[in-house]
Image (spheres, helix red, strand yellow):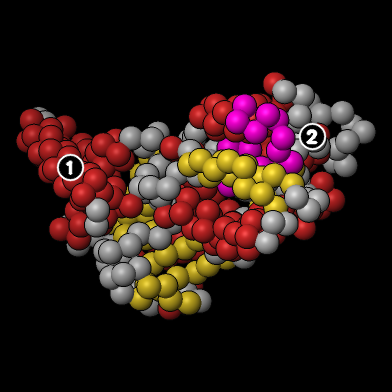
Amino acid sequence: MGGTRRYRFVALLAALGAASAVAALAGTSAAPASRTAAGKADARIAIAFSMPCSTCASRFEEQDKPDFIKSVDKLNPNIKVIASNAQGSDATQIAQIQNALVNGAKVIVISPLDESTGKAVVLKAAKYHVPVIAYDGLLTGVKIAFYVSFANRKVGALQGKYLVSHLEAGSTVAMINGDQTSTPGVDFKQGALSVLTPAFNSKKLKLGYSVDTPLWNPATATTEMQQALTKLNNDVQGVLAPNDGIAGGVIAALKSQRLDGKVLVTGQDATIAGLQSILLGTQAMTVFKPITLEAAAAAKVAVGLATANKKIIKTVAKTKVNNKAGNVPALLLRPMVVTKANVSVVVKNGGAKWSDICSGLPSSICPGK
């Protein structure tokens, strides 16, 4: 662990301690009658579902959270979900998890803001003897119960392959990557480079610009793309954008130079905005990941663990992934490429409704109208 990351990890552990103290103080200051009422209200088994931020991917609030809650309720309506979103703050995510633990959460399902936050949370949960499920991104260096995600390096490779196969020889590519403090961000970038690096080395394509986007912020991506266009004198034919949020930021910068629709832009998550951009021709593709399947798998394992059914892991896991602390039972789902030609696959798999995708679009470009 590097010096900066080690310092960050120690600071996060200290924050966890502070959050614990605040929670304990809050608990002892409550009146006896209030505690009794709270005890009755919180008698149900609880599962914590913690997402990192809305800027990371709009899908966390629009799809993952409601899908997870719906799946848990279907499996066991007597279990409540303590759902939270850290909105880009390490301290907030830690405090939210601490609050869930104090309030009796039996399982933690978390997509951490970064690896350091994830490690700190797992160590704290262990003190409560609460298992942790890594959701969407692998937690490394700590013991976790289960990991559910998509093959994240495969996602990046699919984006890279699209650019290689659709750009003319000699084309210039800008890489507006995701946050590299998060495991998915690292995996997406490495997956893309596994395909793009050979193309760069052979001169089939040229890497004109590469930058990493903190917190996956679309507004930051717009600024980064503007800087890329300035450096390259607008001579760019393809942009590797790891998700639809960053793609949207990139498209905004391209539009200011009247290059939207002329530059191939990748994406991921098949968001409504991303699918609309594809139909409008300003985004070339997205990588669709059936979130309903991911959320349902996480819910199934979480409900099983919360009700002392540890055998549930064996029925859901299809592989094992080494996270540097052991081999973790895992389910890695298959992502797929979506372009203008097959947007319908998202609708067929429950990822979106035509009414939402076509909202505000001309009927001439929307097959759902």
What's under tag 2, amino acid-wise? Gly
Tag 2: Cα neighbours inside 10 Å, few (<14), some, or many (≥20)?
Answer: some
Q: Quadrant of the N terminus?
A: bottom left
Determine whether the residue tagged by mark 1 lies in a helix, strand or loop: helix
Tag 1: Cα neighbours inside 10 Å, few (<14), some, or many (≥20)?
Answer: some
Indicate whether 346 appears above or below 152. Answer: above
What's under tag 1, amino acid-wise? Ala
Q: Is residue 221 visible?
A: yes
Q: Position of residue 298 (x, y in %)?
A: 46, 60
Side of 166 where 266 appears, left or right? left
Indicate whether 95 appears above or below 72. Answer: above
Residue appearing at x 58%, y 37% in the figure: 246
Side of 366 where 217 appears, left or right? left
**How many labels were placed on the picture?**
2
Give the magenta range.
230-248
> Dividing the picture into quarters, in which one does residue 352 lie?
top right
- Residue nearest the observer in this picture, 361 or 283: 283
The answer to which of marks 2 and 1 sits earlier in the sequence is 1
Determine whether the residue tagged by mark 2 lies in a helix, strand or loop: loop
Side of 324 where 199 appears, left or right? right
User: What residue is disc 2 on?
Assistant: 261
User: What residue is disc 1 on?
Assistant: 11
